[in-house]
Amino acid sequence: MTMRMPIAPKKSTTKIYPFNKDRFREALKKPTWKIRLMNLRAGLKTVIDLVKKPVVNEYVHYPLVFVWGEDPHSNLYTHNAISIIYNMEEKMFYLKIETAVSMSSDEMWGQYLLETFEMFTEFMRQNGLNEYAQKDMFMAEPKIELKARTIEELYTEYRMFVNAYISTFDLFPEEEEECEEESDDDFGEDDDDDLII
């Protein structure tokens, strides 16, 4: 049984729009809410005071707050290939992937998932977020969910999901063969020493 290399994020050619803090703040400037963005790196912590009635607009529909989508005009009511939504009551970030698209094969779905993963990777880089956050497995249920307490944990969950999907259906084997050929060249062909373990 051969060990598969995990998918490394590629440089995306898609234009990704970073999280717009000003637009987010403006969407939440209503007399019924007091929300202060404290730290995106720590998972978009917010201070929320609910007074009488909730705000409803294209970015906020209590308890949901639209955080990011692949398009600058993305919001709660648009079809987004990938988007992040924050649930104020649960204090959790959710990753939403558009699946109402017609794909005729597992390879097409795999390519679609890789493209959305690259968009998410670009978003992480533009906002200076950690792409290598660890998943805490101590006393945890082993499962992959597209929700998390922080955006960094959400990214890790999605990376695991995409890797699992591609590995399960053995997609893109030609890329793996190319990686193996490159790795063989690194050791040199002139070494006749046997490796003893």
Image (cartoon, rainbow, N blue to C red):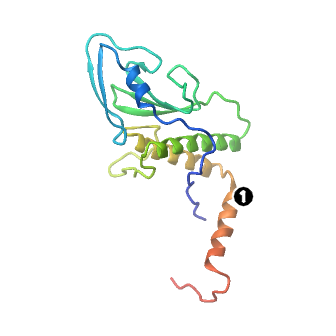
Relative to 80, residue 126 above or below: below
- Residue farthest to the right? 104
Q: Is residue 115 left or right of residue 132?
A: right
Q: Is residue 91 left or right of residue 194?
A: left
Q: Viewer-proximal residue, 6 or 33?
A: 33
Q: In the image, what residue occupies the spot 42% across and 49% down?
A: 130
Q: In the image, what residue occupies the spot 60% across and 38% down?
A: 15
Q: Is residue 1 visible?
A: no
Residue on which the image places disc 1: 174
Q: In the image, what residue occupies the spot 46% across and 39% down?
A: 145
The amino acid marked with disc number 1 is: Glu
The local crowd at label 1, few if under 14, some if 14 to 19, many if 20 or more residues have their Cα within 10 Å, is few
Q: Element at badge 1?
A: helix
**In the figure, residue 92 lies in which quadrant?**
top left
Q: Viewer-proximal residue, 75 or 19?
A: 19
Q: Position of residue 74 (x, y in %)?
A: 54, 25
**In the figure, residue 98 lies in which quadrant?**
top right
Q: Viewer-proximal residue, 165 or 65?
A: 65
- Quarter of the image with the N terminus in it: bottom right
- Residue farthest to the front? 22
Relative to 155, residue 186 above or below: below
